[in-house]
Image: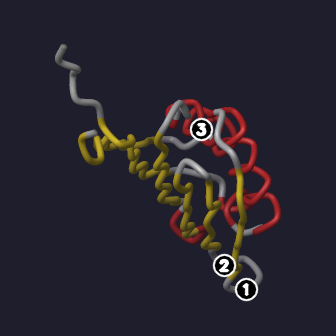
């Protein structure tokens, strides 16, 4: 019996633009947002680490998941955020992106979907 190949995981690369700068500078709120996104996707959070570059400046951070990771880098001076959502197993990365989208309300977005590996 032959089984169709399935990807090891789905990796969403989201470029989100036209975001209110105030939403892109607080590492605690971005941590909480990514945690909510991971939970919506059905992922298991292992660890998080976020770094702010100073008052009014960008944030970089990552949520390590049993299913892989969600990372984000923000440029409030440009109203821009780049998010990577990589999940394997039963987790649903699009649900995570939907939560991030709803919170940041970008004016425009570009999303690339990449199937990672074949199992």
Q: Quadrant of the C terminus?
A: top left
Which residue matches tag 2? 57
Q: Residue 5 location in percent, x, y?
A: 22, 29
Q: Secondary structure at mark 3?
A: helix
The image quadrant that residue 39 belongs to is top right
Marks 2 and 1: in contact by CB < 8 Å? Answer: yes
Q: Residue 36 location in percent, x, y?
A: 75, 42
Which residue matches tag 3? 96
Q: State the CA–CA distance, disc 1 to disc 3.
A: 27 Å
Q: Nearer the viewer, residue 25 or 83?
A: 83
| Mark positioned earlier in the residue sequence (1 or 3) | 1
- Comparing labels 1 and 3, the label whose residue is closer to the camera: 3
Q: State the CA–CA distance, disc 3 to disc 2.
A: 24 Å
The local crowd at label 2, few if under 14, some if 14 to 19, many if 20 or more residues have their Cα within 10 Å, is: some
Q: Residue at x 76, y 69 (%)?
A: 27
Q: Residue reaching furthest left? A: 2
Q: Residue reaching furthest bottom? A: 54
Q: Residue 40 location in percent, x, y?
A: 69, 32
Q: State the CA–CA distance, disc 1 to disc 2.
A: 5 Å
Q: Quadrant of the N terminus?
A: top left
Side (left or right) of 108 relative to 53: left
Q: Residue at x 39, y 46 (%)?
A: 11
Side (left or right) of 36 relative to 10: right
Which residue matches tag 1? 54
Q: Secondary structure at mark 1?
A: loop
Side (left or right) of 29 relative to 15: right
Q: Residue 84 location in percent, x, y?
A: 47, 55
Q: Residue at x 73, y 61 (%)?
A: 22
Instruction: Name the disc covering residue 78, or none.
Output: none
On screen, residue 31 above or below 17: below
The image quadrant that residue 99 belongs to is top right
């Amino acid at each position: 019996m032959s089984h169709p190949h399935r990807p090891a995981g789905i990796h969403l690369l989201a470029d989100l633009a036209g975001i209110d700068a105030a939403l892109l500078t607080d590492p605690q709120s971005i941590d909480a947002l990514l945690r909510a996104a991971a939970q919506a996707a059905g992922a298991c959070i292992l660890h998080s680490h976020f770094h702010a570059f100073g008052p009014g400046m960008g944030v970089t951070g990552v949520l390590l998941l049993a299913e892989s990771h969600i990372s984000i880098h923000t440029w409030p001076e440009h109203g821009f955020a780049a998010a990577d959502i990589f999940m394997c197993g039963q987790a649903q990365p699009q649900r995570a992106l939907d939560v991030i989208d709803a919170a940041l309300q970008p004016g425009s977005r570009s999303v690339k979907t990449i199937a990672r590996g074949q199992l």
